[in-house]
Amino acid sequence: MTLRPSGGSGSALVWIKSSYSGSDNNDCVEVAPTPHTIHIRDSKNPGGPQLHLRPAAWADFVAYAAAGR
């Protein structure tokens, strides 16, 4: 998996979407990392609600997901 910036959001955050997300559909989450917060949103609804996590919590989630749990 590679990550690529998502264009057209118009926000100051740089949103990144996984390469596993197809270009025809936006069925994916996007993340915008900052030093103190990981911002998470649904790429189908970029203006909708966002989840904000501390980097340590995001790292724990990614490790958990990568383990296939």
Image (tube, helix red, strand yellow):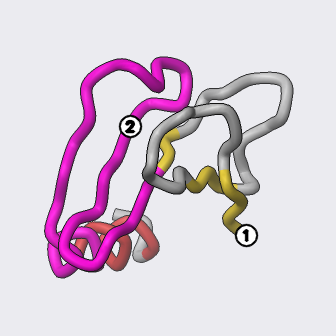
Residue found at x 55% / y 33%: 10
Q: Position of residue 1 (x, y in %)?
A: 71, 69
Look at the image and tell me in which quarter the C terminus lies. bottom left
Above or below for 36 versus 24: below
Going by the numbered disc 1, the residue's amino acid type is Thr
Q: Quadrant of residue 48?
A: top left
Near-viewer residue (7 or 63): 7
Which corner quadrant of the image does residue 61 belong to? bottom left
Asked if the magenta segment contains residue 52, the reply would be yes
| Residue, disc 2 | 41
Density class for disc 1 (Cα within 10 Å; few <14, some 14-19, many ≥20) is: few
Instruction: Answer with mark 1 or mark 2, whichever residue precedes in sequence.
Output: 1
* Nearer mark to the viewer, of 1 and 2: 2
Tell me: 15 left or right of 38: right
Queried whether the magenta region covers residue 53, the answer comes back as yes
Residue 55 relative to residue 5: left or right: left
Q: SS class of the residue under badge 1?
A: loop
Answer above or below: position of 58 versus 8: below
User: Residue at the location (17% across, 80% down)?
Assistant: 56
Residue bearing the label numbered 1: 2
Q: Is 62 displayed left or right of 55 in the figure?
A: right
Query: At 65% from the left edge and 55% from the top edge, which residue is drawn?
Result: 18
**Looking at the image, is 68 positioned above or below residue 10?**
below
Alpha-carbon span between mark 1 and mark 2: 18 Å
- Which contiguous range is marked in magenta? 31-59
